[in-house]
Structures are given as C-alpha cells and as structure tokens.
Amino acid sequence: MSAPPNADLRSRRESVVREHMESENHHDFDTTIGTFSHPRYEIVPTGEVYDGEAAVRSYYEETRRAFPDQRNELVSLRHADDAVIVEFDLLGTHLGPLRSLPPTGRAFRARMTAFFIFEGEQIVSERVYFDQATIMRQLGVAHDPASAAGRISMLVSHPVTIGRAMLAAARARRAGG
C-alpha cells in the first residue's frame, strides 16, 4: 500500500528543507539556491527582503563574510498545508564586518524559526523570525535592558523618553499615595 499523496508531498518537502539547511551549513549555495523555484528570504526582525538569485547570493556573501562559521542546528520541524516550519539554533562567530559593525570576535547562538513556504515541491520563500537583541547582546554591542549597563545605555540613548517615564511614575505615586 502506498502512502497518501499528502504524506508523500510532505516527505519530499521535508527532504528539500533538510537539503537546504545542510547545504547552507556547508556553504554550498548552488545547492541551496536549487531548492527554491524563485530564491527569496524575508528577514522579519530587520524588515529586509532578498528577492531573486542575485539578491539572495549577496545576502549569503554578506552574512558569511561577517560570520564565516555560520551554521544551523535543527531543533524541530513541523508541516503546514503550504509550508515546513523549522525551529533551529543559528550559531556563528563575528569575524568580519557586518555593514558598519566591525568584527567583535564573539560567538552567538540564537533560537530562530523559519517558515519555508512551498509551491509544489520547491521553496518560494524562507521567512525567518528571531530576536535580534539576543544576538547583539552576545556579540557585545547591546546590553540586557534590566542590567545596570543596559539601564545606563537606555538613559544615555533616550533621555527624553526615560525622563518622561520617570515623571509619569512619580506623578502616579503621588496621586496614589
């Protein structure tokens, strides 16, 4: 007895996603590009969209120049009607420039979720969600907002907003007490 078409399609899609992720780990971007019918990345936290092969290859070059050992570790994989949803850890060491940020030499590990959107058996978009502040803290360029350094940084960066919040809190204390 053969598997139902839905189960068979899910299995093929899962294989494509695994090939995609593994080829990214080996920096075999020709294979990675081949998993798309039309290469497209949507990086949700930054609002960036890399649409088309040239843009996606540029994204690979920029991120691997900054993090030459960038790799992913699969945590879990789920299926939806038109997608494979992957939870993974992304790891890397900041050894090259990332736009205006010089290399810090620090490593990061961040939990992420990616939605691999499919048409048929090929990916039409990878949509990635993550907390950018987690990575920036691990690279040493941001502070935990609850720490002393984070509070000082917030005050220096946003004196008007923090001042207004402090005044509002003082008024609320006076009105309530």
Image (cartoon, rainbow, N blue to C red):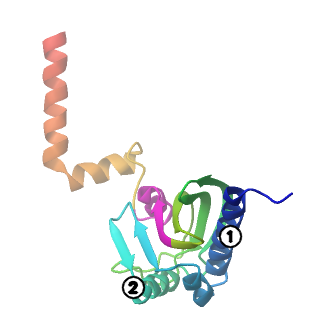
Few, some or many C-alpha atoms within 10 Å of disc 1 (few <14, some 14-19, many ≥20)? Answer: some
Tag 1: amino acid: Arg
- Tag shown at residue 55: 2
Mark 1 or mark 2: which comes first in sequence? 1
Residue nearer the viewer, 26 or 164: 26
Q: Secondary structure at mark 2?
A: helix
Q: Position of residue 11 (x, y in %)?
A: 71, 63
In the rendered image, the quadrant that contains the N terminus is bottom right
Mark drawn on residue 18: 1
Q: In 3D space, how far apart are the residues under numbered discs 1 and 2 (Cα atoms)?
A: 22 Å
Q: Amino acid at mark 2?
A: Ala
User: In front here: 22 or 124?
Assistant: 124
Secondary-structure class at tag 1: helix
Residue 72: image x %, image y %?
A: 63, 68
Residue at image location 44% in from the left, 63% down from the top: 136
Q: Judge whether 155 appears above or below 1 on screen.
A: above
User: Which residues are drawn in magenta?
Assistant: 124-141
Q: Residue at x 62, y 54 (%)?
A: 79
- In the drawing, does residue 24 fall left or right of residue 143? right
Q: From this viewpoint, which residue is outermost toward the front?
A: 1
Q: Is residue 67 left or right of residue 173?
A: right
Mark 2, Cα crowd under 10 Å, few <14 / some 14-19 / many 20+, is: some
Q: Is residue 93 magenta?
A: no
